[in-house]
Amino acid sequence: MQIDWNHFTPWTALLGGILLGLAAAAFILLHGRILGVSGIVGGLIRPHSKDIAWRIAFVLGVLAAPLLYRLTVGLHEVRIDASWSMLVLAGLLVGVGTRYGSGCTSGHGVCGLSRLSPRSLAATLAFMGAGFVTVYAIRHVLA
């Protein structure tokens, strides 16, 4: 592995992490709910009348943020070395995994770990472990 030092941005990454942590803390303090993206989006599939507005606002904000960033700062070129079918398959596997794991990396990894949840620790270790094994297998075993 090699770090591209010309595009290494530790300060913006740190700022992003701080903002994510503050957003998660504010969300649980103000709404009493975990800021887990899969749960929020999943609630749109079977919506309840009193919580659909904030879910839609959240999803629109998640979609609008990179567009606003692109308009103000610009984006670096993104290169994904996978076919559309692989990306769709990966997305479906992530969706199935979040259902079996009762949440996603944002819900367990950010919110659950900060609340010292043993279930979230186990889920985050499983997510990360599966990711490490998958990357190793694809890049070194199957390559």
Image: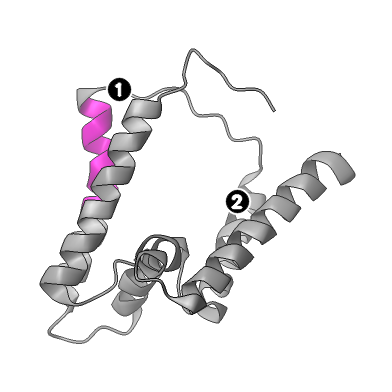
What residue do we see at 66% from left, 51% from top?
86
| Quarter occupied by the C terminus | top right
- Residue closest to the far front: 116
Residue 141 image label: none
Q: Position of residue 135 (x, y in %)?
A: 72, 47
Give the crowd class for mark 2: few <14, some 14-19, many >=20 residues within 10 Å.
Answer: few
Nearer-N-terminus badge (2/1): 1
Q: Which residues are magenta?
A: 61-71
Horizontal side of residue 32 vs 137, given as left or right: left
Q: Residues within 10 Å of mark 1 (few under 14, many from 20)?
A: few
Q: Position of residue 16 (x, y in %)?
A: 30, 40
What kind of residue is marked 1? Gly
- Residue visible at 23% across and 45% down? 64
- Vertical placement of residue 127 versus 87, above or below: below
Q: Position of residue 54 (x, y in %)?
A: 15, 69
Residue closest to the eye, 1 or 41: 1
Report the mark closest to the observer, 2 or 1: 1
In 3D space, how far apart are the residues under numbered discs 2 and 1 (Cα atoms)? 24 Å
Which residue is disc 1 drawn over?
A: 74
Q: Is residue 39 left or right of residue 136?
A: left
- Quadrant location of the N terminus? top right
Q: Which corner quadrant of the image does residue 123 belong to?
A: bottom right
Mark 2, residue position? 87
Give the side of residue 47 with respect to residue 79, left or right.
left
Q: Is residue 14 magenta?
A: no
Tag 1's secondary structure?
Answer: loop
**Residue at point 20%, 70% (across, down):** 28
Query: Callout 2: helix, strand or loop?
Result: helix
